[in-house]
Amino acid sequence: KINLIHHMITSKDKDCAGINIGDLLLRGDLKAYFPLHESHLIAEMKSSWLPWLFMPEDFANKFHDYFGGRVAFYFLFMSY
C-alpha cells in the first residue's frame, strides 16, 4: 500500500500527481516525507515473539508485504 501511495504522489502517469518530492524538500516547502505505519498491522505482527524467531512462511509474506523486500530479506537472513 505504501509503495502504491508513493507512486500515486510522485509518478507522472495518468491520474497521478507527479509531485517531485526532492524539489519540495530542497526548497523547504516540505519539511519531511515518510509514510505512516498502519498500527493494526504492526500490533498484529508484534503480538508474539515466536514468528520473529523462526520466521515461518506466512509471517514472512506478511512482513514482506508491509515492509518491502529489502527489510524482509534482512530479517529472513538473520532468522536463518
Image (cartoon, rainbow, N blue to C red):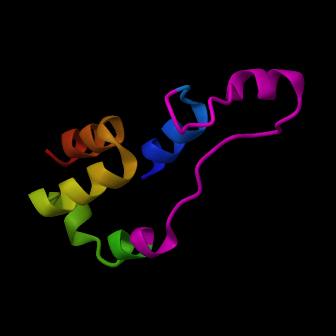
Q: Image quarter for residue 59? A: bottom left
Query: In the image, 31: left or right of 16?
Result: right
Q: Is residue 69 magenta?
A: no
> Is residue 77 at all visible to an observer of this figure?
yes
Q: Residue 40's x, y, as percent?
A: 45, 75
Q: Position of residue 27 (x, y in %)?
A: 87, 23
The residue nearer to you, when weighing 22 against 9, is: 9
In the rendered view, does 74 fall on the left or right side of 26? left
Q: Nearer the viewer, residue 14 or 75?
A: 14
- Vertical relation: 78 (above or below) 27: below
Whether 17 is drawn above or below 61: the answer is above
Q: Look at 30% across and 52% down and name the residue there.
A: 65
Q: Relative to 19, is 45 above or below?
A: below
Q: Residue 49's spot in the image, x, y percent? A: 29, 71
Residue 24 on the magenta span:
yes
Q: Nearer the viewer, residue 9 or 51?
A: 9
